Image (tube, rainbow, N blue to C red):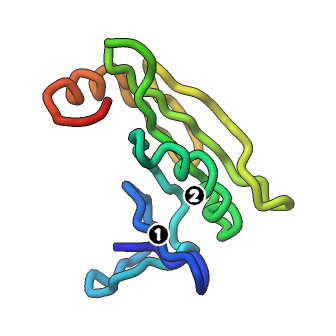
Amino acid sequence: MTVTLDRYNRFLTDAVVIEGAVDMDATTLDPRTIPLFVEVSEDETLHRDRTVKPQRYAASGIPFYWRVEPGEGEARAVVVHTYELVGATRTYTPTGVHRERLKVRRPFMVDIDLTDLRQAARGRRTSW
């Protein structure tokens, strides 16, 4: 499914959290039902995921944005950057850079061992 942000922007994201019921026959989601967008960045999407998408998501009022990136080194590290919307300016403010563990309370309680993701990535074909 895509998310229709406005008349000119309809994005396909890697993961979203949706509040409320979803019409499974629909081809697009309303951004007002999405508290969290997650982008998993690779070499060819990194620039867009760092610049264009956060700007568009913030302008649409998406409360939280997370970006998952490959970390540095041969350990195939996973780094998660978390952001929260500042309503008055419709921009995101950074709330954390998570390398070993993603542990947050907002938008909901999450506690993920990122080293588990690193191990899983070793078995997949990916640019990480």
Q: Determine which residue is flagged by label 1.
A: 11
- Examine the rendered structure and indicate whether residue 122 appears above or below residue 24: above
Residue sitting at 71 percent across and 53 percent down? 85
What separation in Å lies between label 2 and label 1 (alpha carbons)? 8 Å
User: Horizontally, is 127 left or right of 33 in the view?
Assistant: left
- Examine the rendered structure and indicate whether residue 30 appears above or below residue 16: below
* Mark 2, secondary structure of its residue: helix
Q: Which dot marks residue 53?
A: 2
In the rendered image, the quadrant that contains the N terminus is bottom left
Residue sitting at 67 percent across and 48 percent down? 84
Amino acid at dot 2: Lys
The image position of residue 23, as x and y in percent, is 33, 84
Q: Which of the marked residues, 2 or 1, is nearer the chain's N terminus?
A: 1
Residue sitting at 19 percent across and 24 percent down? 122
- Examine the rendered structure and indicate whether residue 128 appears above or below residue 1: above
Splitting the image into 4 quarters, where does residue 5 fall?
bottom right
- Examine the rendered structure and indicate whether residue 10 appears above or below residue 52: below
Q: Are marks 2 and 1 in contact (CB under 8 Å)?
A: yes
Amino acid at dot 1: Phe
In the rendered image, the quadrant that contains the C terminus is top left
